[in-house]
Image (tube, rainbow, N blue to C red):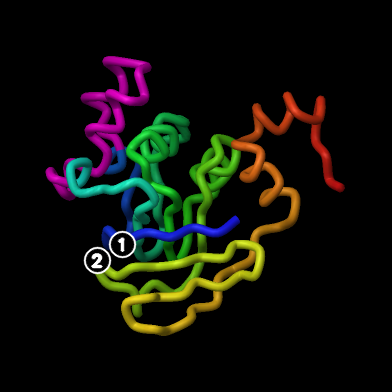
């Protein structure tokens, strides 16, 4: 799985209410509507700045807070191709894999707002095209890559009738 896009950078401890505020996520189940409000408490113009394939990049503990799946689903529907951070809250991490949103763990200090990145999840390499530098990423287990390639856990189960580890 290869990804390419530009960076929208945030700090540490971005919780799920910053990703999609409770004032929106309890009003509708329409993910296209929720996507319009992704990250708006941290960057009111975020949705209008994202182009398909872009990345959210942050520090540590991204996705802390509630365990609801609206956060990763809203990110996906905002056309973000992956979230890159130093670390993730574990429940958020699993929700992202289950919904088909790639997460990349790596040192994000050398990545700046607006940088253009190219990521090869299979090889475990993030290439910063803007700075011509490579950053090693924590590789995802093969089964997680398979689930992501299938579009999430539900699609994976539809395809194989259960987990397929081959």
- For the point 46% across and 75% down, the residue is 127
Image coordinates of residue 9 in percent, x first then y, are 27, 62
Q: Secondary structure at mark 1?
A: strand
Q: Residue furthest right?
A: 166
- For the point 86% across and 47% down, the residue is 166
Which of the pair 13/147 is nearer the observer? 147
**124 within the magenta span:** no
Residue topped by disc 2: 114
Relative height, residue 152 to residue 133 (above, below) = above
Number of the label disc, if any, that sits on residue 152: none
Which of the pair 112/58 is nearer the observer? 112
The image quarter in which residue 4 lies = bottom left
**Drawn side of residue 154 relative to residue 67, left or right:** right
In contact (CB < 8 Å): disc 1 and disc 2: yes
Count the numbered circles shown: 2
Relative height, residue 156 to residue 124 (above, below) = above
Residue topped by disc 1: 7
Which of the pair 50/89 is nearer the observer? 50
Span colored in magenta: 20-45
Image coordinates of residue 95 in percent, x first then y, are 54, 38
**33 within the magenta span:** yes
Q: Main secondary structure of the magenta part?
A: loop
Image coordinates of residue 145 in percent, x first then y, are 67, 51
**Drawn side of residue 88 relative to residue 153, left or right:** left
């Amino acid at each position: 799985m290869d990804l390419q896009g530009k960076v929208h950078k945030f700090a540490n401890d971005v919780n799920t209410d910053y990703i999609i505020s409770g004032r929106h996520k309890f009003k509708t189940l329409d993910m296209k509507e929720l996507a319009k409000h992704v990250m708006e408490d941290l960057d009111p113009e975020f949705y209008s700045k994202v182009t398909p394939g872009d990345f959210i990049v942050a520090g540590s503990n991204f996705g802390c807070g509630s365990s609801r799946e609206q956060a990763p689903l809203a990110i996906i529907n905002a056309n973000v191709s992956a979230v890159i951070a130093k670390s993730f809250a574990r429940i958020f991490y699993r929700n992202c894999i289950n919904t088909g949103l790639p997460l990349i763990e790596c040192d994000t200090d050398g990545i700046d707002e607006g940088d253009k990145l190219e990521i090869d999840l299979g090889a475990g390499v993030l290439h910063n095209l803007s700075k011509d530098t490579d950053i090693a990423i924590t590789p995802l287990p093969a089964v997680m890559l398979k689930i992501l390639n299938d579009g999430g856990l539900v699609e994976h189960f539809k395809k194989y009738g259960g987990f397929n580890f081959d």
